[in-house]
Image (cartoon, coloured by chain):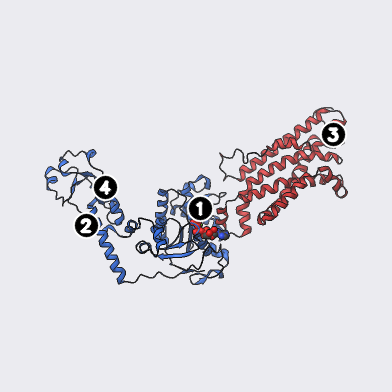
């Protein structure tokens, strides 16, 4: 009854159930973040003056500890997954908005001029030229957001065991079963690496037009998402 | 103000070149034609109609625009790049792609490149794709902004020849921007020289530009060798070619001795088919034993029927003997001509041109579109 994958009954899930829950709580916020970021970033590209204040707001929001969000939200959304996912959505903006803005802005001037000269309207130009060319930058942003979201879900433990795999850390403490903590950390790391790998695959699929040989690291200096995950786990 | 009170009559079905120093407003003028820049005053008429009256994207789709550095869509394959405008005009995918492949052939691109992406192409190939893309929907008007500036001189010459060939086949109205006066003179039916501020310095056919620059600015812009360049407009067909000083490599001693060299100090030796091999002094030749390695090089021959006096003179200057070799289209020797004879032909041609200029008034170009501001 004390095996590595034996989950204490108070969590009401098998290990696989926790994994599913964890993925949902981590990925839905990233998706929501993307949905919010796309129009927000487009506004920032369209109206240049908007970008610095938007960047500032997302950074400030990122600096608010998740606990403070929970205190604020718990009156409205209660001890639910939603209370965990809303802050995670907000956190993802700090990565996604600049990624999309930089990506869209990186489209060469002459490509845009060519599109305009061929009679592309602004909407068509955005959807058929700017967005596809921004895909590598957007996916780079998604990788960081996804991996950090996977580790951040753990804080949900604080509000009535909504931390999915993160709850195991708490249980390891309560039941004095350190292997549960090891399980939690390894499982989350595995999920992060898997999700990251899938996103890399997605990018390869979506960007056959990129030179293959020079694609080692899109941006030097950007920390490895997996490393970020371990850092964020401390939040 | 980038372009000020510019008034141009751009002739139909011909190449009009806008040329001028950097920043003089060439790109701005071109962009006004497809309304990427709106003039603050004045009108632009296309076939007598104000372009302001048309919906802007309809207007743009009816004009091909070739942008500097091609400006290809890096995320689309070559066929899809070329098929862009037809697709926007509502053509089916297969029809648009078939059209794209046809155009690739027309601009001299290998069909195997169709499924490649722009990063896999050389600069020259990308320029060709840019031209094909602009031609895709068969627009009557083609706007080209320094389309060949990013490629090396050899590729550029190839692209220029290609453009002239396409123009001859399709009869488009082309407005071509360049800062290279040689390119302007080579391609233009009419050349507009612009000076900073978008003022028109001169608008004339290239030959007239070279012979009568309107002012010191134009003269300066044409460069020091405009006299030589102007010779490109005089055909070499009138040159009197000598066939006397030519012997075949297998000629007998009597044949060599019987040559009437017509005062030429050298004999041109050809192979059995008549292709030039090299020059030799008559005394050095031993019939039946002509050593080709000892012949003097003959430089670069000119084609008698099609080349200009400029090529002929160039050949004579390049030849160590001072004599130019004329060949026919197949490369067989048509005759030889001395620098002196070419010089006389040049003087004659100039005199004739002056006389005909005085006699007939300059032919008026057809009026089609008008740029004014
Ligand atoms: N978008 C713009 N807004 C304001 N001024 C501009 C703009 N684009 C160009 N200009 C100015 O207009 C003038 C003409 O520019 P234009 O691009 O037409 O020059 P050009 O003749 O094409 O030069 P080049 O040979 O360098 O391409 C320049 O002085 C330039 O600074
Ligand atoms: Mg320009």
* A232 up-or-down from B65: above or below: above
Name the mark nearer the viewer: 3 or 4. 4
Q: Do the residues indicated by labels 1 and 4 lie within the same chain of the protein?
A: yes
- In the rendered image, residue A122, in percent from the top left (x then y), is placed at 62, 59
Q: Do the residues indicated by labels 3 and 1 lie within the same chain of the protein?
A: no
Tag 2: Cα neighbours inside 10 Å, few (<14), some, or many (≥20)?
A: some
Label 3: state its secondary structure.
Answer: helix
Would residue A53 be found to the left or right of residue B25 on screen?
right
Q: Quadrant of the N terminus of chain A?
A: top right
Q: Do the residues indicated by labels 3 and 4 lie within the same chain of the protein?
A: no
Pointer 2: what residue? B240
- What chain is tagged by disc 1? B
Nearer to us in this view, A8 or B35: B35
Q: Is residue A35 visible?
A: no
Pointer 1: what residue? B70
Pointer 3: what residue? A170
Tag 3 and tag 4, C-beta contact below 8 Å: no
Measure the C-alpha gap from mark 4 to mark 2: 18 Å
Nearer to us in this view, B128 or A223: A223
- Pointer 1 or 2: first along the chain: 1
Q: Which chain is red?
A: A
Pointer 4: what residue? B319
* A191 up-or-down from B214: above or below: above
Name the mark nearer the viewer: 3 or 2. 2
- What chain is tagged by disc 3? A
Name the mark nearer the viewer: 4 or 2. 4
Q: Do the residues indicated by labels 3 and 2 lie within the same chain of the protein?
A: no
Q: Which chain is blue?
A: B
- In the rendered image, residue A177, in percent from the top left (x then y), is placed at 84, 28
Instruction: Report whether the residue tagged 4 is closer than 8 Å to ligand 1.
Output: no
């Amino acid at each position: 009854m004390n095996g590595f994958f034996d989950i204490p009954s108070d969590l009401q899930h098998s290990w696989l159930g926790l994994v599913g829950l964890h993925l949902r709580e981590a990925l839905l916020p990233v998706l929501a973040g993307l949905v919010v970021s796309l129009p927000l970033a487009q506004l920032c590209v369209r109206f240049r003056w908007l970008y610095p204040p938007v960047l500032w707001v997302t950074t400030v929001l990122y600096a608010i500890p998740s606990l403070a969000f929970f205190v604020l939200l718990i009156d409205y959304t209660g001890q639910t997954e939603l209370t965990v996912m809303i802050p995670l959505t907000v956190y993802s903006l700090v990565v996604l908005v600049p990624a999309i803005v930089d990506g869209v802005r990186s489209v060469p001037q002459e490509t845009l001029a060519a599109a305009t000269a061929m009679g592309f309207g602004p909407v068509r130009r955005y959807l058929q030229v700017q967005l596809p060319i921004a895909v590598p930058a957007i996916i780079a942003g998604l990788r960081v957001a996804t991996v950090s979201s996977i580790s951040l879900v753990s804080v949900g433990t604080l509000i009535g065991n909504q931390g999915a795999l993160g709850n195991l850390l708490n249980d390891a403490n309560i039941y004095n079963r350190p292997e549960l903590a090891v399980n939690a950390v390894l499982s989350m790391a595995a999920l992060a690496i898997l999700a990251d790998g899938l996103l890399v695959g997605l990018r390869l699929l979506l960007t056959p037009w990129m030179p293959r040989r020079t694609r080692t690291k899109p941006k030097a200096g950007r920390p490895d998402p997996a490393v970020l995950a371990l850092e964020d786990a401390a939040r | 103000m980038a372009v000020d009170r510019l008034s141009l009559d751009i002739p139909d079905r011909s190449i009009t070149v806008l040329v001028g120093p950097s920043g003089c407003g060439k790109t701005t003028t071109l962009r006004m034609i497809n309304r990427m820049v709106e003039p603050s005053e004045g009108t632009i008429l296309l076939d007598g109609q104000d372009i302001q009256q048309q919906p802007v994207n309809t207007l743009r789709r009816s004009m091909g625009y070739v942008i500097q550095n091609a400006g290809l869509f890096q995320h689309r394959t070559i066929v899809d790049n070329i098929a862009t405008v037809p697709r926007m005009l509502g053509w089916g995918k297969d029809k648009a792609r078939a059209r794209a492949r046809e155009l690739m052939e027309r601009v001299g691109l290998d069909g195997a490149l169709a499924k490649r992406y722009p990063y896999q192409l050389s600069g020259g190939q990308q320029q060709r794709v840019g031209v094909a893309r602009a031609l895709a929907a068969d627009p009557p008007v083609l706007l080209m902004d320094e389309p060949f500036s990013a490629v090396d001189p050899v590729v550029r010459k190839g692209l220029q020849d290609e453009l002239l060939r396409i123009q001859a086949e399709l009869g488009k109205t082309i407005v071509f921007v360049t800062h290279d006066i040689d390119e302007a003179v080579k391609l233009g039916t009419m050349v507009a020289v612009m000076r900073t501020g978008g003022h028109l310095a001169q608008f004339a056919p290239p030959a007239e530009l070279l012979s009568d620059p309107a002012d010191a600015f134009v003269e300066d812009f044409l460069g020091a060798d405009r006299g030589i360049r102007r010779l490109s407009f005089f055909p070499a067909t009138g040159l009197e070619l000598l066939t006397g000083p030519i012997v075949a490599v297998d000629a007998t001693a009597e044949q060599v001795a019987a040559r009437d060299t017509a005062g030429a100090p050298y004999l041109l030796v050809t192979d059995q088919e008549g292709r030039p091999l090299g020059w030799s002094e008559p005394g050095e030749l031993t019939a039946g034993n002509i050593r080709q390695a000892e012949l003097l090089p003959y430089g670069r021959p000119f084609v008698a029927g099609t080349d200009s006096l400029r090529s002929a003179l160039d050949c004579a200057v390049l030849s160590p003997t001072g004599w130019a070799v004329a060949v026919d289209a197949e490369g067989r020797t048509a005759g030889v001509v001395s620098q002196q004879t070419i010089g006389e032909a040049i003087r004659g041609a100039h005199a004739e041109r002056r006389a005909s200029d005085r006699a007939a008034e300059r032919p008026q170009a057809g009026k089609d579109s008008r740029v004014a501001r």
